[in-house]
Image (cartoon, coloured by chain):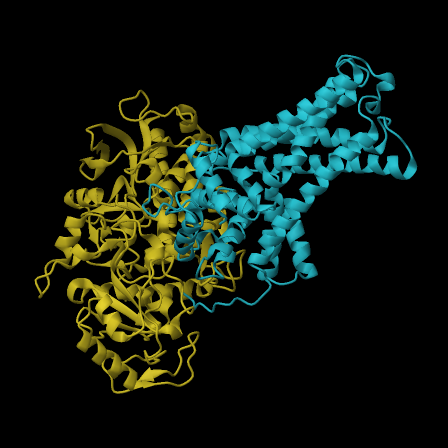
Chain colours: A yellow, B cyan
Amino acid sequence: MAPKLVAPRLRCPPGGAQSGAGLMPLDVLVVGGGNAALCAALTARAAGASVLMLEAAPREWRGGNSQHTRNLRCMHDAAEDVLTDAYPEEEFWQDLLKVTGGQTNEALARLVIRESSRCRHWMRHHGVHFQPSLSGTLHLSRTNAFFMGGGKALVNAYYRSAAALGVQVRYEAPVAHLEFDGARFVAAHLSGGERIEARACVVASGGFESNREWLREAWGCNERGEWPADQFAIRGTRFNRGVLLQDLLAHGADAVGDATQAHMVAIDARAPLYDGGICTRVDCVSLGIMVNRDGARFYDEGEDFWPKRYAIWGRLVALQPGQLGHSIIDAKAVGRFMPPVFRGAQASTLEDLARQLDLPEAAFLKTVHEFNAACRVGRFDHAVLDDCHTEGLAPAKTHWALPIDTPPYFGYTLKPGVTFTYLGVKVDEHAAVHFGGKPSENLFAAGEVMAGNVLGKGYTAGVGMTIGTVFGRIAGASAAAIVREGLRDAA
Amino acid sequence: MTPLDALARDAAALGGGTIRAAAAPGAAEDEVARQMQICNACRYCEGFCAVFPAMTRRLEFPKADVHFLANLCHNCGACLYACQYAPPHEFAVNVPQAMAKVRLHTYADYAWPAPLGALYRRNGLALSLALAAALTLFLALAAAWQGTLWAAPAAGSFYAIFPHDFMVGLFAPVFVFAVLALGLGVARFWRDVDPGAPGSAALAEAGANALALKYLDGGHGEGCNNEDDAWTLARRRFHHLTFYGFLLCFAATSVAALYHIAFGWHAPYDVTSLPKLLGLSGGAALVVGTLGLLRLNLTRDPRQGDIAQRPMDRGFTALLLLVALSGLLLAFLRDSHALATLLAVHLGAVMALFATMPYGKFAHGFYRSAALLKWAIEKRQPNPLQLGDE
């Protein structure tokens, strides 16, 4: 095997590979510039293939949503470096099964889980550093390995490693569509008109969350005549416009997932339209009450620990009138939750708070008074599912229910923030994209564009990066193997 | 801020001085507070250094806390390249730059006596004037006493050019003043966020972190940043050569003083003598270290730190280089006709270094060490916040 691995490397020395019309045909074209694309490119290059990455974003915005990530979920049978205790395959699988409600492919999911235990050594080799779980994330110290400095530091390390290995990278090179011969990839066409041929292609171009029109169409118009998606902020990159996903589906690639399924968080309504990332989240929901535009509560704020519930509130708020929610707390909650990036509205009376938040005063006061009256306060403890709850209130608040009665009062207006979408293309265990139930011989997918195979709905922290890393490496290895086989057959 | 201070700041701005004055009083501190509010909601950089763990113990960032955090920052650059909110993001987070701008205010605002703090804002000018004045003084004295600057002195003795007591009489007060001024400035800085008395563990940790430049290791040991997002240990290593080279030179002078005063052993000393060995090795380390630091400073990403302070950094480093080079040359050209000139240049450079010590780049080591000690004490105290698991 070894001599054959060397052959392509000699043919295309680092930095000397040609893209497009050059003399030497390109082995592997990687469309995308985030974690999955980088993992694919690094793996294919290390296997001897010449590799070109096409990143739609300019260099300063490179890395897609990966620049906003901070960890990946890893299976491990005993405490390892930054991970405490054990997180065995079966537990990881059960966690995934629970959050997806069964909308997952067990074979692919178990592949991801098993491979997740073997990622970190490879990641370190390419310059990624890990650190113990960050302050405020103790609940993840067992299951998730944190990147030192977060996802952008990881992306930077991978780009440096890619440069050292001779992977070519082009920024501001958005691909408009792919050219096929049946289900066989032939070439990519850039938005500027350039055509780039390659022996194999890895699509790792992300979801479609930044395509406002597509989101609008997917969410449609509600019974109030609103287009909910118009109010969504995108927590990640503005470059995930789903161009390749749309193109692949139009070419007959098999779809997985549903266009309305996405990782959605209720974030501060003042968040920027794109790239607000992690800091726009507001973590005081379980310490107070959440009311809608009409001043009414609409869900149990104390249903479960916040880390287990934060990802349901984006969708809950999206269903409210105006797609807005207001998290209301009093002075007792100050200093008990992660500090939010924007200061909340602050008032010494509930009436004033209602005015500041543009809430109907009477309805809001009624909600608070009814809630306060329904509170059965026992021993408040935010670290456990405590016995502070409401009685005779609908919806109930089942834990951490303390009356909102101690000024100053604070209010944070929240709106839905989309992290990433789950609609994707169907792949097999080699990351090959399926067309009409059959795998393409030279087109592979990794990352968000195929994450829906494993994560059809719901979310558990760090699993997106796990899927991207595992399938990125698989896609890169598969693409390099196809190139190798092709060359062997030709010889 | 004192009116004089404000005037000096305005004057510096009007004169287009090397240091750009902040747009408004407290603007530099406000900018750090703004960025810390963003960082505190993100926290990805916690593993790089002590600034971010110290930040997580706070919800608000008043001026004194900002100065503490700014001096804890070693300007390693790691958090700039890792930051998802760095420009061109609209949040425009650049912690190393914001902290560097505040540090200049720390040195100026806490300086003793206060009016001299304004010297930081025209540091290039202050340094040049001090150097020119000191050089003129020594050259003129040498010429006057020797009759010429070009004569080989008897037995290569420095004291034949400048009498021992004259040198002591001139340098001792300047040095004592420098130490006093720096000490009083740092004491004021310490009282502003007083973390309490240090225990021995805190002292040991802070000392080790300062002496090892722990926070230029990137948190993972591969170093900090200079030109781009790649790690390098060069900054740490050249700083070590500079710092320990300086200490060796200082030790050489101290040992020589001891020989002179306590044992009556007068210079010049043998090449194998302790003062010579310390001085030669220290001088060599200082030359290599400062040249390395200057090269790194010239190639550093302009986004890292406050580019307006680079003249101060370079001026200080260049002065150290001049001290080291002239000192080394003195050791080798003892019997040369150039000795008197060389000695005058060396003494002038040393005098300029001492005189500007409390009002220039030299101060960074003292304020940073104090901040490291504050952190070592603070981290051993219970966290005042009980933020739930996010």
A153 or B254: nearer the eye? Answer: B254
Q: Quadrant of residue A355?
A: bottom left
Q: Name the residue located 71 percent from the left edge and 39 percent from the top edge.
A: B175
Q: Name the residue located 43 percent from the left edge and 67 percent from the top edge.
A: B389
Q: Position of residue B353 (x, y in %)?
A: 65, 33
Q: Residue furthest front?
A: B3
Q: Quadrant of residue A347?
A: bottom left
Q: Position of residue B13 (x, y in %)?
A: 43, 36
Work out whether residue B292 can be spotted. no
> Where does the C terminus of chain A fall, quadrant-wise?
top left
B101 or A376: nearer the eye? Answer: B101
> Where does the N terminus of chain A fall, quadrant-wise?
top left
Q: Is residue A230 left or right of residue B271?
A: left
Residue B129 against residue A258 in the figure, above or below: above
Q: Is residue B241 left or right of residue B172?
A: left
Q: Is residue A135 left or right of residue A105?
A: right
Q: Name the residue located 49 percent from the left edge and 64 percent from the top edge.
A: A86
Work out whether residue A21 can be spotted. yes
Q: Position of residue A400 (x, y in %)?
A: 36, 78
